[in-house]
């Protein structure tokens, strides 16, 4: 009786609803009186109107009111079509209200299909309990439920995270005369996956084959499991299901491939993601904007934004319209690579051709400027943004963080006031940035006041706030003070995490207190936090830099036994340490082990090996690696070129160095000031003074002006060859640029001038800055 009362009570409420979507449902049904003839509405006309795409909810309500008073009355079939049409418009309370009116009328009796529509509406409006009340009423009327009806309830329970109840209903279906079908199984599988029970979902998937042909997995079943496996990082398992789909004759769709591409991208497997993309196209599927955007994101995160840009062009060629997310991915990728001009070009194209940048796009580019120390450009863009797009908390935090890093405290206060005036309240990220700034500037009193203000504002510092504070204080060399914050965290009932301990360990290592760093690591283990790969990297690096290479190797070798796998960073750290102490053979063996373990070398690995080989006079080996990398299309950066050129110059193989220098532009790279200085040094050693001078002029024209090292190198070379007048002329140029002689060059001048007894004569020719320094 309780279920039926709940049902009627809800219907009564819904029939008097005043919401915009249901108010029309409370229109009174017009009854004919006396000799008034009831309105004429044929069943055929009602059915045709229900199937019309132009039907509105108001039209549907008018049709219902006309139908229930018509003579003769339309069949329940036509009424069900009308209720179904309203349900498709998602006006679920209206469906329930009209069904209530049917119960109050005579002549049109609801049937099993009517109840199915009502139960579906209850579940879709998140009122699954009401759906069970309808089911109870149906059973009391002696009607038998259908599988479709129970499927609605299973799906409703799963959407409400009541998966255990859904599984119980699924098991009871045969007892109620309903056999589960693929929809029943797929609904339960989706519920299990959404609540983190993917293993149980896979078990049910395996059992579906034993439940008969009606339960044979379909594309929805497979896509649901594959999607969640990829979200959990279990891409290999997802790929096995992909193969199973093919064997079962279930054809994949775009969503299937998108899930796998997402899984590979999230794991950083961009090559595999590209492989799935190619397979997708080969199978005749057209990638959508989601596919392209995910692949663009994967490429951009791995420094391949130029390739991601080509994908955007391909997207347009194939008739897919890139959205604001696609363009924002490019802006972010170029910013992360320091290619701000390219990022700005993409952004400007959005302003001109669309889609218009949103607040996230602006925030990404502003962050790019901030991270590349271009604060004026960041502030300028922020000001332009406010003319058409409202900055959000992320945008404000980005600009504030940039100002904080520059120590522009007054500007921070002004922007903070503006932010609050706009109704955007600071959050924990805002306060964390400002706290760091105060710590870096030594404003400890202000930092403590801000912590108090956070408490007053009910913004409680979290673990991230303290980690950021500890990091900032450690970078100032105040590790003891940072260590004291661990006690502050304990007082606030906050447990330090691995990041906290790692930050403190790194701080001790930076100030050369390795033993204290080890003690922090021991404390971390004592507190129940196992060191991660980053923890080991810190200690291995510190041991290497302290010359304690065997201890570093011991720690490195013990990582797998502690359940921590080596990463490319760990290998790079160990390789750098071995090359630093001249253990080239050990470094080469470690590199072989790295490859055997399936760890792919990154750009930093090539930098370390090339630099290590060159500095240990293994020039031929370095040249072979360098050439192999170029022929393998490894994207070497200018640092690799610099290491190789410097090694060749020091090995007195200048022509080979010159050849490599001339190939830099072929790799779309630009020499930096270090490259030019190495080449200048080589030219001076070869006695090619005119060429060195020409290179100096070329530096100016190429936008890479000479620095103090450039001038000192040339002057040193001229003095070596006793080209005194040319050296003095170069010193004058150096003076004009505002550079000074380094101590070794100044000493060289003094010794050379004193040798022939003409010290005072040459001294008169030198610029004032040198004369002043010798008085």
Image: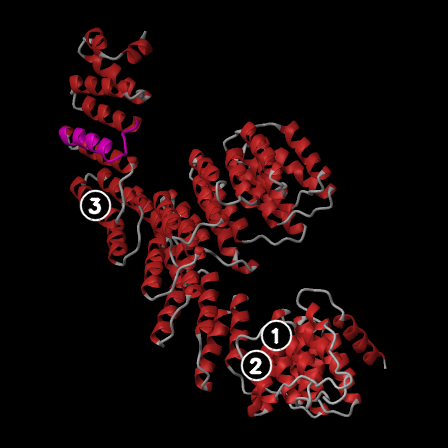
Mark whose residue sits in front, 1 or 3: 1
Cβ atoms under marks 2 and 1 closer than 8 Å: yes
Q: Which mark is residue 49?
A: 2
* Residue with the mark numbered 1: 59
Residue 552 point in image, percent of width and height: 48, 48
First along the sequence among labels 2 and 1: 2
Q: Residues within 10 Å of mark 1 (few under 14, many from 20)?
A: some
Q: Is residue 441 left or right of residue 622?
A: right
Q: Is residue 480 left or right of residue 278?
A: right
Name, please, the residue furthest toward the front.
35
Name the foreground residue: 61 vs 668: 61
The answer to which image quadrant residue 746 occupies is top left
Q: Relative to residue 385, is residue 591 depicted above or below?
A: below
Majority secondary structure of the magenta segment?
Answer: helix
Residue 745 point in image, percent of width and height: 28, 21
* Residue with the mark numbered 3: 660
Range of magenta residues: 690-707
Identify the residue shown where x is 81% and y is 79%. Answer: 3
Q: Relative to residue 354, is residue 672 depicted above or below?
A: above
Considering the numbered disc 2 on the image, is that residue within a helix, a strand or a loop? helix
Identify the residue shown where x is 68% and y is 73%. Answer: 94
First along the sequence among labels 1 and 3: 1
Whole-number angstrom distance, CA of label 2 to CA of label 3: 78 Å
Whole-number angstrom distance, CA of label 2 to CA of label 1: 9 Å
Residue 269 point in image, percent of width and height: 42, 63
Residue 457 point in image, percent of width and height: 71, 39
Name the foreground residue: 166 vs 206: 166
Is residue 24 visible in the rendered structure shown here?
Answer: yes
Name the foreground residue: 326 vs 320: 320
Whether the magenta-drawn stretch holds residue 551 is answered as: no
């Amino acid at each position: 009786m309780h279920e039926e009362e709940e049902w009627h009570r809800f219907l009564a409420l819904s029939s008097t609803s005043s919401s915009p979507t249901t108010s029309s449902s409370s229109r009174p049904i017009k009854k004919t009186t006396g000799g008034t003839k009831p309105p004429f509405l044929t069943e055929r006309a009602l059915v045709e109107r229900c199937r019309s795409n132009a039907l509105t909810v108001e039209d549907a309500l008018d049709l219902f009111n006309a139908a229930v008073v018509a003579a003769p009355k339309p069949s329940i079939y036509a009424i069900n079509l009308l209720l179904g049409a309203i349900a498709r418009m998602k006006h679920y309370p209206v469906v329930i209200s009209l069904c209530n009116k049917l119960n109050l009328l005579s002549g049109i009796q609801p049937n099993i299909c009517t109840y199915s529509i009502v139960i579906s509406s209850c579940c879709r409006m998140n009122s699954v309990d009401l759906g069970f009340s309808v089911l109870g009423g149906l059973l009391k009327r002696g009607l038998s439920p259908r599988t479709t009806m129970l499927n609605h309830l299973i799906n409703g329970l799963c959407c409400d995270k009541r998966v255990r109840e859904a599984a119980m209903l699924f098991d009871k279906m045969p007892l109620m005369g309903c056999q589960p079908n693929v929809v029943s199984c797929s609904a339960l599988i989706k519920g299990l996956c959404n609540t983190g029970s993917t293993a149980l979902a896979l078990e049910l998937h395996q059992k579906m084959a034993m439940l008969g042909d009606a339960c044979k997995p379909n594309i929805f079943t497979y896509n649901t499991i594959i999607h969640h496996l990829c979200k959990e990082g279990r891409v290999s398992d997802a790929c096995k299901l992909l193969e199973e789909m093919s064997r079962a004759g279930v054809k994949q769709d775009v969503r299937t491939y998108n899930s796998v591409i997402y899984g590979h991208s999230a794991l950083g497997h961009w090559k595999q993601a590209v492989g799935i993309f190619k397979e997708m196209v080969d199978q005749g599927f057209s990638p959508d904007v989601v596919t392209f955007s995910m692949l663009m994101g994967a490429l951009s995160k791995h420094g391949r934004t130029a390739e991601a840009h080509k994908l955007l062009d391909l997207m347009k060629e194939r008739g897919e319209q890139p959205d604001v997310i696609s363009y924002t991915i490019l802006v972010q990728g170029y910013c992360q690579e320091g290619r701000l001009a390219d990022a700005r070009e993409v952004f400007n194209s959005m302003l001109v051709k669309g889609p218009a940048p949103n607040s996230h796009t602006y925030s990404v580019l502003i962050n790019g400027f901030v991270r590349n120390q271009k604060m004026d450009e960041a502030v300028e863009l922020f000001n332009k943004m406010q003319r058409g797009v409202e900055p959000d908390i992320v945008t404000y935090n980005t600009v504030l963080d940039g100002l904080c890093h520059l120590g522009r405290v007054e500007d921070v206060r002004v922007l903070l006031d503006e932010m609050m005036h706009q109704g955007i309240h600071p959050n924990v990220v805002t306060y964390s940035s400002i706290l760091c700034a105060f710590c870096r500037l030594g404003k400890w009193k202000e930092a403590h006041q801000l912590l108090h203000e956070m408490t007053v504002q009910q913004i409680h510092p979290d673990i991230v706030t303290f980690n950021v504070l500890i990091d900032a204080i450690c970078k100032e060399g105040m590790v003891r003070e940072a260590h004291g914050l661990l006690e502050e965290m304990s007082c606030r009932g906050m447990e330090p995490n691995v990041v906290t301990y790692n930050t403190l360990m790194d701080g001790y290592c930076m100030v050369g207190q390795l033993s204290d760093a080890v003690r922090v690591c021991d404390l971390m283990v004592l507190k129940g936090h196992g060191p991660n790969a980053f923890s080991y990297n810190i200690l291995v690096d510190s041991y290497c830099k302290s010359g304690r290479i065997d201890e570093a190797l011991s720690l490195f070798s013990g990582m797998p036994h502690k359940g921590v796998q080596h990463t490319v960073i760990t290998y790079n750290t160990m390789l750098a340490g071995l090359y630093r102490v001249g253990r080239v053979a050990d470094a080469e063996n470690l590199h072989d082990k790295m490859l055997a373990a399936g760890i792919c070398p990154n750009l930093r690995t090539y930098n370390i090996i090339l630099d290590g080989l060159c500095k240990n006079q293994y020039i031929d080996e370095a040249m072979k690696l360098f050439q192999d990398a170029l022929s393998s299309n490894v994207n070497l950066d200018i640092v690799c070129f610099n290491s190789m050129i410097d090694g060749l110059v020091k090995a007195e193989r200048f022509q080979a160095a010159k050849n490599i220098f001339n190939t830099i532009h072929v790799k779309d790279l630009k020499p930096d000031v270090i490259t030019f200085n190495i080449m200048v040094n080589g030219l001076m050693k070869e006695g090619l003074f005119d060429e060195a001078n020409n290179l100096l002029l070329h530096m100016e024209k190429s936008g890479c002006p000479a620095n103090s090292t450039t001038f000192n190198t040339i002057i040193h070379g001229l003095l070596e060859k006793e080209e005194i007048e040319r050296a003095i002329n170069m010193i004058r140029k150096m003076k004009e640029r505002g550079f000074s002689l380094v101590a070794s060059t100044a000493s060289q001048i003094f010794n050379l001038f004193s040798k022939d007894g003409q010290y005072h004569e040459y001294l008169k020719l030198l610029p004032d800055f040198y004369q002043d320094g010798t008085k």
